[in-house]
Amino acid sequence: MPDDALLTSLLAAVDAAPDDVPLRLHVAGLLADRGRIPEALLHCTQALSHDAANPEAVALLQRLTAALAAPATPDPAAEHAREPAAFDWSSAEEQVSDIAAPELARAADTDPAPTVEDIEKPTVKLADVGGMDDVKQRLELAFLGPMRNPQLARAFGKNLSGGLLLYGPPGCGKTFLARAVAGELGARFYDVGISDILDMYVGASERNLSQIFDAARRNAPCVLFLDEIDALGQKRSHLSHSSSMRNTVNQLLSEMDSLSGDNDGVFVLGATNHPWDVDSALRRPGRFDRMLLVLPPDAPARGAILRYHLRDRPVATLDVDRIVKATEHFSGADLAHVCDTAAERALAASMKAGQLRPLTTGDLEAAVREIRPSTGPWFTTARNVTAFGNADGSYDDLAAYLRKHRKL
Amino acid sequence: MSAAERVEHLRQLGRLDDAERQARAALAAEPGDARLLAALAAVLLGTDRTAEGLAAADAAVAAAPRDERAHRLRALLLSRLGRHQEAVEAGYVSVALAPEEPFAATGYARVLQRAGRLNDAVRVAHHVVTLAPNSADAHFLLADVTSDAGDRRTAREAYAETLRLDPQHAAARHDLAVLDARSHRLSRALKGLVDAGTMDPSMTQVLQTVTVVLWQLSWRLRVWLAIATLVAIVVSGTEAPDRPTAAARVAAVAILLASAALTWWTTRGLPARTRPVVLAALRTDGPLRFTYLATVACIVVYAVIAVTGLGVLAAVVWLVLGMLGWLTLGVRVFRSARQRREGR
Ligand SMILES: Nc1ncnc2c1ncn2[C@@H]1O[C@H](COP(=O)(O)OP(=O)(O)O)[C@@H](O)[C@H]1O
Ligand SMILES: [Mg+2]
């Protein structure tokens, strides 16, 4: 076949020029068209190892992993992982509770938790997260790709066990991203706020971590999100020696270790503002051994966040780009605050004038002048940490960012 | 676990917001609970909301007038508010109620220290150490107040004892390094600061102190260069400034060698971890960075003199040093003015 002659010669060309990313991607695309997915994937991952941020490569990887998930496989785990994707959850929201109820009723007589509100099915997708392409691509590579196709990941020697730890300044979208990850996987989302864990620790709650993990397994595929896990660590607090805190941490460790390997469809995501305070035992291989830096929203993300918060408010024609430029280093939460403050100004002006005066770019600018980005103190600490605590290179991303933004 | 204990645990975990919420929720059911009121006061002290904290402490004292802790918290809050006389009185009450309680005495010492009664504070701190000889924090208190009182010898010993009892006591390591810097033992200070930062990377004060030490070091470097330049100008003579002379060459080489020896001497005991720390400190302080670059430029000028023999170039170094002198003076004036403005 002439077609395959072309492919053969291209493959030879790739062998001759292994660093040529566009060529390799072209070949990978051709292989994918011919259904030779594993080979295509091999080339795609090699291209990504040369140029991790290549959007074409990432797109291809998504396509390939999706293609791999499609054909029926006898593996029950994969069966399991696919099932919810086929089901249209967003249009059947009210059915969720119906389905969940009997199961929970059953669960209720063995353990008191979780309640139905704890587990939900997020409909946010990564596409709803404005900007932050870098983080999305890394999530795709480090988490979503392998999770969508566990068998394939295993074939490449990629270990599925262990969680991914999102870290960064407060209010910059860690929680939001975690929900989007669940939405992306078509998985349920179980948000274990730190207050839940602290309640266990201080004895205000009867349930414990193993019940939470059991519930997550019953609801697999499920993203178990442990927010603010630094509170569990507290390296330097005297409480880290207290036995009940130690117990809670040890329970978490053994639950995470028990997830390894058996691929029960429970994906663990963690988030923290202070990774340097996280108990070092939690950072060992097989636990939260990978860290992903979530920085203040970049310009496209800021635009998206501003538009989102202004969507239901009476606005004049706004120069959002101008506000985006003026709000570097603002967190998502700061931007919400800017919009609220601007709305207050417009409201005050309207009341004074006795008629509606829509919110203007000027209102937003005045609000920006009033509000200082709340990420400042975090970056002060972060700079210190990269200076003193980066001997093992785990904060290289952060150090690079700080080098680029000296003013922070 | 009681509600008050729960609040205490949350506070010690650093979850001050959660602690406050729990305390207020529990107080809504039991508004007169002295332990809860004291716990809330402690949380608010931690968040620097002193006025609200004082209200809680006042209520705690009213509910349990013989509770040492309520009086102690009241004292600390009054002290934060600058009401030193009342603070000392409240501190005295708490010590009188529990004379054997090291926490009470510690609070009293802190209040006296902040009121400027350093000699009294030192006496109380010594008493705390006799009450709790195995507590690192007791020795740290003694070190802190004696250091304030100008007794560096006792302070140094007490810091050493703190670190012997708790080798990871980052604050003690940092403050000991500050003492070293004040005694002009700069490379020792730098080493101590790197240790302190490694023990607790989130202690942001450390990097600031590093820049202070680097300023001191740059001053020392400039004094050395100024003296060397004077000598070089005298040695290379003035009769033929525009022509290469052997004397200028020899003087330049001598200065280069001596500078190298001095640098080696200063940095010899420093661990490899010092490098990223110094670089980070330089990144945060523009004028400091400029000063070091200019100093390096002076050394380069001497290398040029060593090669060309043109002694007149030493005048360039002189000019640069003069300019740096004015720059540092300006920076110092500007920064202390800003500090005063922000302090007010
Ligand atoms: N890139 C983004 N796109 C849209 N909204 C964002 C983005 N980043 C942050 N936000 C918004 O900012 C708010 C704070 O984010 P959150 O995830 O709670 O921060 P964190 O968990 O990092 O403290 C959320 O309400 C979220 O909607
Ligand atoms: Mg969050």
Image: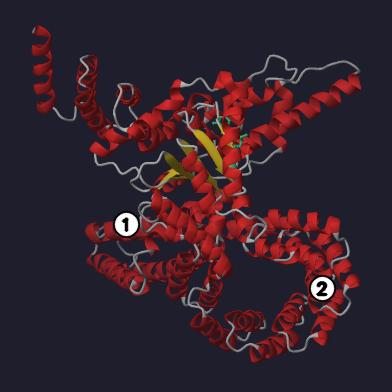
What secondary structure is marked by label 1?
A: helix
In the rendered image, residues at marks 2 and 1 fall on the same chain: yes
Numbered label attached to residue B97: none
Q: For mark 2, name the chain.
A: B
Judging depth in this view, the residue of A262 and B184 nearest the camera is: A262
- Residue lying at the far bottom of the rendered structure: B130
Q: Amino acid at mark 1?
A: Val
Viewer-nearest residue: B330 or B177:
B177
Which is nearer the N-term, disc 2 or disc 1?
A: 2
Question: Comparing marks 2 and 1, which lies closer to the viewer?
Answer: 2
Query: As displayed, is residue A193 above or below residue B310?
Result: above
Up/down of A355 relative to A138, above or below: above
Asked where in the image residue A142 lies, by quadrant, the reply is top left
Q: Alpha-carbon neighbours of circle 2 within 10 Å: few (<14), some, or many (≥20)? A: many
Q: Nearer the viewer, residue A272 or B344?
A: A272
Element carrying mark 2: helix
Give the spatial CA distance, label 2 vs label 1: 64 Å
Answer with the quadrant where ligand 2 appears in the image: top right
Instruction: State the colouring used for the structure image.
Output: secondary structure
Q: Amino acid at mark 2?
A: Ala
Q: Position of residue B205 (x, y in %)?
A: 57, 63
Q: Residue pushed farthest top?
A: A2
> Residue drawn 25% across and 61% down?
B306
Residue highlighted by disc 2: B70
> At x 44% / y 67%, what residue is drawn?
B194
The quarter in which the C terminus of chain B is drawn is bottom right
Write down the residue under mark 1. Answer: B300
Asked whether, in this view, residue A361 is left or right of residue A299, the answer is right
Image coords of residue A124 (percent x, y): 54, 27
Q: Residues within 10 Å of mark 1 (few under 14, many from 20)?
A: some
- Callout 1: residue from which chain? B
Instruction: Work out whether A347 lies above or below B52.
Output: above
